[in-house]
Amino acid sequence: ASSDSALAVKFYNNSDEGLITAGDYHIRRWTFDGLALDHVEANLGSMKRTFKCLAISTDDRLLYAGSSTGDVFCIDLVPSIPNFVFAGREIFQNGIRCASYVENRGSGYVILGCGDGTIVTLCAKTMKKKSQGKALG
């Protein structure tokens, strides 16, 4: 139900009329047409995760959602019902706490902050790890 708590909120990069929320077992796309706020649930199939953080590609086409179990999912935002595309193959220790999407020389990357202090860079297209480091402290 739309009354479930949102644990993460991310606004679109190129539009003032939409945002994404996520939480226990759900990801929702919200749109505002000036009069009404409406939402649609993303199609996640049988996946049951608690989503803690979100990152949206600069063109607003793809969403990357980090979970409390340490996996990251890619969701296509273009269809009328956002649709699961693929998941990364690696599970990160103590969950994913924060995520950001960046572009460098035409390539997209997802930077993840994990619960064990690890910072990871993934290729946005393949979700393969490009680099990893540990935050001190």
Image: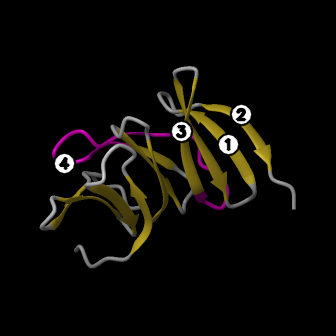
- Would you name the residue on which mark 3 appears? 89
Q: Name the residue furthest top.
A: 105
User: Residue 120: which numbered mark, if any?
Assistant: 1
The N terminus, quarter of image: bottom left
Residue 55 in percent (x, y) is at: 47, 49
- Would you name the residue on which mark 2 appears? 131
Q: Which sits earlier in the primary sequence, circle 3 or circle 4?
A: 4
The C terminus, quarter of image: bottom right
Residue 25 in percent (x, y) is at: 36, 65
Q: What main secondary structure does the magenta stretch of the protein show?
A: loop
- Would you name the residue on which mark 4 appears? 81
Q: Are marks 3 and 2 in contact (CB under 8 Å)?
A: no
Q: Which sits earlier in the primary sequence, circle 1 or circle 2?
A: 1
Q: How far is disc 4 from disc 2 in space, using C-alphas?
A: 33 Å
Compared to residue 80, the image places residue 2 above or below, namely below
Secondary structure beneath disc 1?
strand
Looking at the rendered structure, the kind of residue marked 1 is: Val
What's the magenta region?
A: 75-97
Q: How far is disc 3 from disc 1 in space, using C-alphas?
A: 13 Å
Q: Which sits earlier in the primary sequence, circle 3 or circle 2?
A: 3
Q: Are marks 4 and 2 in contact (CB under 8 Å)?
A: no
Q: Are marks 1 and 2 in contact (CB under 8 Å)?
A: yes
Q: How far is disc 3 from disc 4 in space, using C-alphas?
A: 24 Å
Q: Which sits earlier in the primary sequence, circle 4 or circle 1?
A: 4
- For the image, the number of numbered tags is 4
Residue nearer the viewer, 95 or 52: 52
Q: Nearer the viewer, mark 3 or mark 2?
A: 2
At horizontal 37% and vertical 77% (from top left) the residue drawn is: 5
